[in-house]
Image (cartoon, helix red, strand yellow):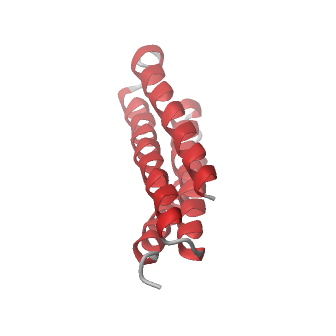
């Protein structure tokens, strides 16, 4: 499981940097300042949770168990829902996509709680 979360973390980091550069250079001329800010929030949270997944990969070697695995999957799902919905919202303007964002945010929060509890069995 530690290799899987490490691999996903690296992929999230790579894609986050690529999307950040894409937004700064290619999207800047096509999105409103508000849409660009929304996109950048998605990038920021994706990159933060790429690092969080690296912590999960490390924690899985130190304190293996259900809490660490739950934290990892909650970070993966939360990042996809939170950042993904912000990307889609900013690029399409479909406001209904914003309803997915809080679900992703709750998953990210739950991931942090699981990671907090991981060393305390």
Q: Position of residue 11 (x, y in %)?
A: 57, 37
Image height check: is 63 above or below 47?
Answer: below
Residue 39 lies, in percent from the top left, at 45, 35
- Using the image, determine if residue 86 lies above or below residue 106: above
64 and 96: which is toward the camera: 64
Q: Is residue 29 above or below residue 113?
A: above
Where is residue 104? Give x, y as percent.
Answer: 54, 58
The picture quadrant where one finds residue 32 is top left
Q: Nearer the viewer, residue 44 or 41?
A: 44
Q: Quadrant of the N terminus?
A: bottom right
Residue at figure coordinates x 36%, y 28% from the top left: 33
The answer, for residue 98, to whether it is visible in the render is: no
The reply to whether residue 38 is visible in this rendering is yes
Q: Nearer the viewer, residue 91 or 23?
A: 23
In the displayed image of the protein, which residue is found farthest to the front? 62
Residue 19, image x, y percentages:
49, 28
103 relative to 23 in the view: left or right:
right
Residue at figure coordinates x 55%, y 71% from the top left: 64
Total marks placed? 0
At 55% across and 30% down in the image, what residue appears?
91
| Relative depth, front residue between 29 and 21 | 21
Farthest bottom residue?
121
């Amino acid at each position: 499981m530690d290799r899987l979360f490490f691999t996903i973390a690296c992929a999230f980091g790579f894609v986050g940097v690529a999307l950040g550069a894409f937004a700064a250079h290619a999207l800047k001329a096509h999105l409103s300042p508000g849409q660009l800010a929304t996109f950048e929030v998605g990038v920021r949270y994706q990159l933060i949770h790429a690092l969080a997944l690296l912590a999960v990969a490390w924690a899985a070697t130190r304190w293996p168990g259900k809490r660490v695995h739950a934290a990892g999957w909650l970070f993966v799902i939360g990042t996809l829902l939170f950042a993904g919905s912000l990307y889609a919202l900013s690029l399409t303007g479909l406001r209904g996509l914003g309803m997915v964002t809080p679900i992703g945010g709750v998953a990210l929060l739950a991931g942090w709680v699981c990671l907090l509890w991981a060393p305390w069995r």
